[in-house]
Image: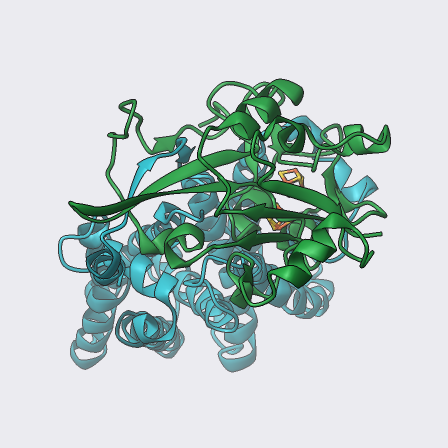
Amino acid sequence: MKLGFLVDLHLCMGCKGCQIACKVENEVPLSTWRLRVKYVDVGTFPETKRTFTPLRCNHCENAPCERICPVSALHYIENGIVNIDKERCIGCAGCVMACPYGAIYIDPETQTADKCTYCAHRIASSMMPACVVACPVEANIFGDIEDPTSNISKYIMQHNGDVQVRKPEKGTNPHHYYVGGGNVTLNPLASFRVEGHQLFNKLTTKMPVGGHH
Amino acid sequence: MVHEAVAATHAVVTLDVGLPGIVWPWFVTMNMWAKSIGTGVIFMLFYLQKRHGDDPAVATLRFPVAVISIVFISIFLLFTLADLHQPFRMWHIFFYPHWTSPITIGAIMASAFMGLITILAFFSFIKKDDEAYDKLLLWTMILAIPVTLYTAALLSMCTARELWQMPTETVQMMLAALLSGAATIILYDAVTGSKMKEESIRSMAIILGLAAFASFTMYMAEMIFGPMKAEEVAAVLEFVKGHGEYATMFWIGQVFAYIVPMALVLLSIVNRSNNLLKLAALSAVVGLWVVKHVWLIIPQLLPMS
Ligand code: SF4
Ligand code: SF4
């Protein structure tokens, strides 16, 4: 069994339900996120469009974070999830640097690395990840990518040709797919970030790392 | 490249969370800089013994070099520890080692290296056994090679930080050790009354000058050709080009670490001037910190997602 995620960006409406459900389920501290939905506006008025991209750990098959961790705090579990043992983590931040997707952060409360675990604790009790349950449009599809009869496998087969992963050139082989993705949604360098100014807030882009330094 | 992409798509991030700031700060710069000196002086002593063993001043370098190496490797270890968010769990590295991680391998090798240089100090100061010292120096020098290089492996394993490539970083780490090792020996000789023979000091000057030249050439090659290789490299190098956030600091580093030492080494050899050489050495040691710092920080300024 290899668990995977697929987000159909045609369906996602940017409600951030998954983002909040994840935050609550995993008690993710203030200023840090395991899952976030990024809004990117494209085009020039009046030809504009808003895109929404949920971003979380990809549970890479060839995970640089797992490889670089000096104490195996990041490790694979049998179902393919890249999990983290926070008790073992020494907080070297090697994984934060190694992950090509910016999916890991230093938890300011525990001073250890943390990230999306596909809600491994819920899966162990045969429940779906919190974000999947919260999504009102079922844009998050989760399941066994090795089982051809699973929803996710069928979805991948049906949308063959429109299924993408982030940064495939990094050779990480993500177990997280997007349908309807494109350069703007999946490539962080394809969009411009205005420092300190966003739609509903005045957020400084750069945040302190783990309340340290 | 980023700007072209924006022009093409008119894409602007309008809502997102704050991204992590600098994850590896100047503590890591200190780590790399101090390690270069700590291993560099060992390379230099080994070379001087082989090449200029007849210089009586070289024979007196045994204890000072061991001490300099201990001091700088201690600084390196201290800053490595201080950079951990859970420093009291450092022991996990030795009890739960993960062998694919250069951090694990590096920690073990650096600890062993620390042990060897401490024994060198013991042989030279307490036991006064030069023969044992010189035998051990060979093994210490051999271990100094991977200790110098493992950080390059660590940087190159940061998959999306395209600026840090293998084997470029390996070569840069080795050149940094040669540059700072030679500079430190020159400075040590200067403060202890310039006792080394002219040929020995000239060897150090040549190593300093050549290491500066090779390093500078590689940085400039990366500046010119790097952007053609990968979108990320192009975006990162924007920070040190033109009016980039780190452009001034980058050039201060290049001038102090490489350009000034190259010029002064040349002038000092032509004019047989030791004073110019001292200045070159000081400039290189200071400049190297700045160069390392800029190269460490800029890939971290890029959004990964
Ligand atoms: S997305 Fe990042 S954190 Fe997740 S498995 Fe891949 S490398 Fe690790
Ligand atoms: S911060 Fe923790 S999980 Fe990440 S590499 Fe270091 S020890 Fe491993």
Rendered position, B33 above or below B92? below
Locate ligand 2 by image quadrant: top right
Between A186 and A159, the residue placed more toward the observer is: A159
Residue pictured at 20% horizontal, 61% vertical: B255
Q: x, y (%) of residue A189? A: 35, 55
Q: Residue at x 75, y 28 (%)?
A: A87
Residue B258: name its quadrant: bottom left
Q: Which chain is cyan?
A: B
Image quarter of residue B251: bottom left
How many numbered markers are drawn? Answer: 0
Colouring method of the image: by chain
x and y percent of residue B191 in the render? 34, 52
Q: In which quadrant will I find the C terminus of chain A?
A: top left
Front residue of this view, candidates B43 and A46: A46
Query: Which is nearer the eye, B259 or A187?
Result: A187
Above or below, B163 against B305 in this view is: below
Question: At which x and y percent is residue A74?
Answer: 72, 43
Left or right of residue B266: residue B130: right
Q: Position of residue B149 (x, y in %)?
A: 57, 64
| Left or right placement of residue B145 versus residue A128 in this view | left
Decide if residue B114 is in sight here. no
Residue A7 seen in this snapshot: yes
Q: Residue visible at 23% across and 78% down?
A: B269
Does A114 sit above or below residue B206? Answer: above
Q: Which chain is green?
A: A
* Residue under the image location 60 percent in, 45 percent down: A95
Foreground residue, B43 or A155? A155
